Amino acid sequence: MEKWQKDFLELIETAVDEVERLFLEVTTTVETLFELSGEFSEHLHNTIVTEVEQYLADLNDDVDLDSYWHLDDLMDDSEISFPYSVEPTPQQHPACMGCQHYHGQVYGGNLMVCAMHPYGWDDSNCPDWEAEEFEF
């Protein structure tokens, strides 16, 4: 082997060694960074949890929350209702009959007629009335 070939081979080996050393240093640095960030996030989490628990304990001492926890016991199960549909009739909301905007759902005892006129229109001719579109 000639001298320039040996020099070139040594140069390549040196470059490989340096790149390997660089990767080892980067790996060590990244591992250290992950360890430090893990410790920092754990410390931060513990600090925040402690402060929030202390704040809630102080709030509980200041306000009598026990009276609020039992409010659901006061509600009668019959008062809880699910939305149901109501169709317009000539006696109730005649302007809404056949209108595509009619919603007709009862929420908590309150009828939602449509978005434009939540309580319905007073007479039999609504200015926003549009015929229902049926899709087949």
Image: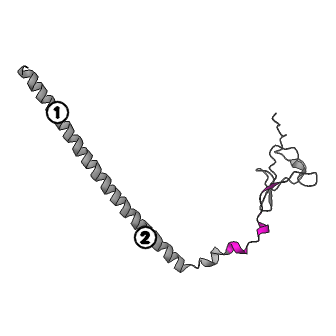
50 lies left or right of 25: right
Disc with the residue nearer the chain's start (1 vs 2)? 1
Q: Distance between the residues labelled 1 and 2?
A: 52 Å
- What is the quadrant of residue 80 in the picture? bottom right
SS label for mark 1: helix
Q: Does the magenta stretch include residue 79?
A: yes
Q: Name the residue under label 1.
A: 15
Toward the top, the furthest residue is 2
Q: In which quarter of the image is residue 78?
A: bottom right
Counting labels gives: 2
**Residue of label 2:** 50
Quadrant in the picture for the N terminus:
top left
Residue type at numbered disc 2: Thr
Rate crowding at label 1 as few (under 14), some (14 to 19) or many (20 or more) other CA atoms within 10 Å: few
Between 12 and 58, the residue placed more toward the observer is: 12
The answer to whether residue 20 is left or right of residue 87 is: left
* Residue 48 spot, x, y in % from top left: 42, 66
The residue sitting at the left extreme is: 3
The residue at 37%/61% (across/down) is 42
Chain part drawn in magenta: 71-85
Q: Who is closer to the viewer here, 83 or 128?
A: 83
Q: Mark 1: which amino acid? A: Ala
Q: Is residue 83 left or right of residue 16?
A: right
Q: Which is nearer the eye, 134 or 18?
A: 18
- Label 2's element? helix
Name the residue located 25 percent from the left edge and 48 percent from the top edge: 28
Report the residue at 15% width, 31% height from top.
13
Q: Does the magenta stretch include residue 31?
A: no
* Residue 30 drawn at (x, y percent): 29, 48
